[in-house]
Structures are given as structure tokens and as C-alpha cells.
């Protein structure tokens, strides 16, 4: 799709509608294998497994959550296929041609947090391997810089640098990398699970982990109720859905390259409910078998691989997990802020420069390591900030515009989406109120119930979307009355 009469402040080649569409169902499937099959994805799945208390509960909670994720991703994915534009450009329809920079920057900042978290996880896998050597273990324990061990800092910088090499040749290189990295980690996860099951001599989904240990390991998860209770299962499903909050916004960055909506739907079906549930079950089996073998609950796969008797197997596991985590960082946390920052200053910031800004921000965050909290806490806080944006954009696209949009106007300052000098007041009123209830009040005050934060993303979507819809309908009535 080509657009004409574009404004230089709103257009560059990276932000233009996609013309070459080569991403079939397999590539879309591998967007999800790259996104989920990471150390952080495993850590979250294993943590949620403990909260479920049993295999059946885990299947129910994760299964329901994965179906919801499939529906939501299909909504934003279809918008990407139909328009061919990335997330910050699509946001112009609801927030205004220049107002869209606000949600774009919010998404970019969140991506920088995740970029740092995933890079730290990947470097942690390398550290876990290296400290098997006594000399490096002593160095790790005795030398520290910037709040971390010097060995951790060195590995972080090396992994951080390697990621920049992948993106040098653009989105097609990203596709080829994820097509290889996604399946590779699946193979390693299965090897890890089979190794531990054989060594433990049992195949189980949690029955060997005593209930008192489950309660002890989940007491600080910020989830109401004991493991296996209805409130705990509801929180598990909500947290699993919220984990994908960032990609609900920018999945169109990838789906716009899909060959068709049919290919998108097929890739999403295999990559989301089917793949997500299978991955989580492997995480559950591995966690249980690791407890039977080592007598402790190990939620991080690098902790498990570090205990392997075979140094070669430990090396293979560490490298595979590191590569897989690089995959999710490139897919979810480099591509998105690259487009987001480029959207702010299209004439000065290209896709690559935007990605470099995101990577540098993550590097600067490393000494503070804001991601070193409980998995559920971190996911829910980060995710809640984006709920209102998603609600506003989906209400605008599906309920207000009925999936019909003048794509060319997204690139014109004086077009349909100018609103109030490039800013749409209705969207920002809805965003402010939605954010108040999704993240500000539950995070910084005790006004709302303690469980509210677990569902912050949902409240943000519902409140932000509803207020936007009411404001838009209210503004239409006077216009209709004037015509009559």
C-alpha cells in the first residue's frame, strides 16, 4: 500500500505501510515461540504453576488465559494486516497525529524495562554456567560493580552488545532469526524436562511438592488466597493475560508483514493457545522433577542447568536459553521502541536509531535493576500502564470506525486525525482516568483493595475504553443534530 501527500513530520520509510508481506503462518507462530520461550517466560510459568497447586488447576487457568490472549492478539493483529501500519501510526487514529507520541513513548519505556529484564536473564544463564569454575565463582563472589557482581556486569554488557548485531539488517533478519531461535529453545526445554524426569524416576505435575512449601514460596506473590483456591486461579489467568500487555499494543508491528488474515489466524492459533499451554506444561513438569531430584523449588531454568552433572549439557542449556532470550528481546523489546522513537521524530530517528535509544536506556537501567522483584508483581505493574491505551485503540478501530480507516490520512498533518492541533482530547481524558484506576491508585495509594493491582490491566482496558466510547458518542450527537 502506497500513500501520497505525506507530511515529513509524520512519515519515513520505516513507518510507511508495509509493501512486502512475506510473513506466513510459520513466521507468525515463531513470533510467539520467540516471545514466550525465554527465561522470564519460564520463570513466570513456573511461578504461576506453584499458585495453581495442581495439574488440573494449572491447565484450566493457563488454558482460559491463553484463549483470551488469542482473541486479543487476533484483534490487534487483524488491524495490522488490514492497514499495514505499525503501532505508533495506528495510534494516530485515536490519539491524534502528534498525540500518538504519548502512547508510543509509554510503550517504548515499558519495552526498555523489559529489554533490561530479558538481557539480565540471558546473562544470568551465562553466569550460572561460568561459576561452575572455582576461580570464576570466587571472582563472582568477591568483585562487585554498580550493585552487581563484576562477572554479572561483564556478561550483561556482552549479551547486550550481541543483540545489536541481529537488528543491523532490518526486519527480514529478525524474521529469519526468530524462525531458528524459537524451535531451538523448544528442543532444549524438552531435553531439560526429559533429563530431569529420567533422573527423578517419576513423571508428575506437582503432587510431589508438599503444600506447605507451595504456601511458603507463594506467600509474597501478591496474590490473594492459598495455592489452588479460586482467587489464586483467577489471579493466575489474569497475570498470564497481563504478561502480554505490551504485545497487545504493538503486535501490528509484526502482523502488518503477514501474507493474509488467514495466515495470521493460523499462526496465532498454533503459537498462542496451543503453544502457550504446551510450554507451561513443560515448565510444570520440569519444576516438579527438579524438586524430586534436588529437593528444592527451582523457578529459574539456569538454576536447574547449573546443577547438571554434565558440563557439556549445562553449556548447551545456557547457550540455548541465552539465544532464546535474545530472540524475545529483539522481537518484543527492540522492534517496538525502534518504531516508537522513530514516530516521535521521523525526520531524524530511523528504525535502527530508535532501537539504539531503547538499548541504551536498558543499559542505563541495569544498575537499578527494577525487574528484580517477584514475577507477578513486576508483570502486573508494567502491564497495567498499557491497559487504557489498548482499550482506547480497540474501541476506536472496531466500535467507532467499524474497521474502516483512511490509512493515507494517518500521515497528513491536516487530515482527518488532526483533531485539536494533532491531539485528541477525548483519548487523553480517557487515558488519564483509565491510568488513574489501573496503575496510579493501586500502586501509590491504599484506597483500592489489595487485589486490585492484579487486575489493573483489565480495569484500564474497560475504564479507558468505555470513557472514550462515551465521549465519542457524545460528540457525535451535537454534530448530527446540527445537520438536521
Image (tube, grey):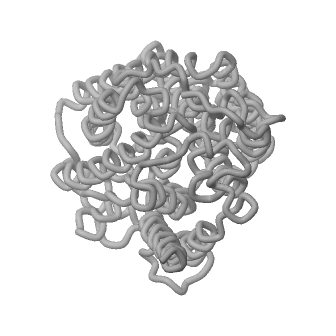
Residue located 42% across and 37% down the image: 36
Is residue 307 visible in the rendered image? The answer is: no
Decide which of 365, 111 is in the foreground and name it: 111
Residue located 70% across and 62% down the image: 423
Residue located 61% across and 33% down the image: 335
Residue 74, located in which quarter of the rendered image? Answer: top left
Using residue 236 as the reference point, say whether residue 361 is left or right of it. right
Q: Which residue lies furthest to the front in this view?
A: 484
Residue 429, compared with residue 321, is above or below; it is below
Decide which of 328, 400 is in the foreground and name it: 400
Using residue 217 as the reference point, say whether residue 434 is left or right of it. right
Residue 426, located in which quarter of the rendered image? Answer: bottom right
Is residue 236 visible in the rendered image? The answer is: yes
Where is residue 334 drawn, in percent x and y? 63, 34
Position of the N terminus by quadrant: top right
Residue 121, compared with residue 65, is above or below; it is above
Where is residue 161 drawn, in percent x and y? 72, 25
Where is residue 79 drawn, in percent x and y? 44, 43
Q: Which residue lies furthest to the right in this view?
A: 348
Where is residue 34 drawn, in percent x and y? 45, 29
Residue located 67% across and 62% down the image: 419
Q: Which residue lies furthest to the bottom in this view?
A: 447
Using residue 94 as the reference point, say whether residue 339 is left or right of it. right
Using residue 230 as the reference point, say whether residue 163 is left or right of it. right
Amino acid at each position: 500500500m502506497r500513500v501520497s501527500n505525506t507530511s515529513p513530520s509524520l512519515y519515513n520509510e520505516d513507518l510507511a505501510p508495509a509493501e512486502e508481506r512475506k510473513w506466513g503462518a510459520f513466521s507468525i507462530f515463531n513470533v510467539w515461540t520467540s516471545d514466550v520461550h525465554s527465561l522470564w517466560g519460564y520463570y513466570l510459568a513456573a511461578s504461576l504453576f506453584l499458585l495453581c497447586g495442581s495439574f488440573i488447576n494449572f491447565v484450566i487457568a493457563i488454558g482460559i488465559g491463553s484463549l483470551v490472549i488469542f482473541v486479543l492478539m487476533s484483534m490487534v493483529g487483524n488491524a495490522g494486516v488490514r492497514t499495514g501500519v505499525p503501532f505508533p501510526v495506528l495510534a494516530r487514529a485515536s490519539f491524534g497525529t502528534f498525540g500518538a507520541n504519548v502512547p508510543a513513548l509509554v510503550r517504548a519505556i515499558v519495552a526498555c524495562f523489559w529489554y533490561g529484564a530479558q538481557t539480565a536473564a540471558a546473562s544470568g544463564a551465562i553466569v550460572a554456567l561460568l561459576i561452575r569454575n572455582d576461580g570464576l565463582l570466587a571472582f563472582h563472589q568477591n568483585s562487585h560493580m554498580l550493585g552487581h557482581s563484576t562477572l554479572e556486569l561483564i556478561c550483561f554488557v556482552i549479551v547486550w552488545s550481541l543483540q545489536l548485531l541481529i537488528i543491523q539488517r532490518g526486519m527480514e533478519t529478525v524474521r529469519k532469526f526468530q524462525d531458528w531461535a524459537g524451535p531451538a529453545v523448544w528442543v532444549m526445554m524438552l531435553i531439560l524436562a526429559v533429563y530431569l524426569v529420567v533422573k527423578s524416576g517419576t513423571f508428575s505435575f506437582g503432587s510431589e511438592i508438599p503444600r506447605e512449601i507451595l504456601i511458603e514460596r507463594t506467600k509474597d506473590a501478591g496474590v490473594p488466597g492459598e495455592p489452588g483456591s479460586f482467587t489464586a486461579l483467577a489471579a493466575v489467568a489474569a497475570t498470564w493475560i497481563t504478561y502480554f500487555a505490551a504485545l497487545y499494543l504493538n503486535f501490528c508491528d509484526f502482523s502488518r508483514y503477514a501474507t493474509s488474515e488467514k495466515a495470521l489466524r493460523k499462526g496465532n492459533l498454533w503459537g498462542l493457545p496451543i503453544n502457550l499451554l504446551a510450554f507451561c506444561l513443560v515448565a510444570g513438569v520440569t519444576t516438579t522433577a527438579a524438586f524430586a531430584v534436588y529437593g528444592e523449588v527451582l523457578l529459574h531454568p539456569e538454576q536447574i542447568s547449573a546443577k547438571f552433572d554434565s558440563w557439556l549439557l549445562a553449556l548447551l542449556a545456557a547457550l540455548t536459553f541465552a539465544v532464546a532470550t535474545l530472540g524475545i528481546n529483539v522481537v518484543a523489546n527492540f522492534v517496538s521502541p525502534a518504531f516508537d522513537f522513530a514516530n516521535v521524530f521521523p525526520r531524524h530517528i530511523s528504525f535502527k536509531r530508535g532501537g539504539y535509544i531503547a538499548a541504551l536506556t536498558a543499559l542505563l537501567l541495569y544498575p537499578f535493576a527494577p525487574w528484580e522483584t517477584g514475577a507477578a508483581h513486576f508483570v502486573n505493574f508494567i502491564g497495567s500502564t498499557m491497559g487504557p491505551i489498548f482499550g482506547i485503540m480497540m474501541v476506536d478501530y472496531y466500535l467507532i470506525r467499524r474497521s474502516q480507516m483512511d490509512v493515507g490520512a494517518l500521515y497528513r498533518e491536516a487530515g482527518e486525525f488532526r483533531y485539536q492541533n494533532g491531539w485528541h482530547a477525548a483519548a487523553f481524558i480517557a487515558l488519564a482516568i483509565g491510568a488513574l484506576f489501573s496503575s496510579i491508585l493501586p500502586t501509590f495509594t491504599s484506597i483500592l483493595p489489595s487485589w486490585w493491582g492484579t487486575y489493573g490491566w483489565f480495569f484500564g482496558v474497560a475504564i479507558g475504553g468505555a470513557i472514550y466510547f462515551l465521549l465519542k458518542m457524545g460528540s457525535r450527537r451535537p454534530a448530527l443534530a446540527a445537520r438536521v
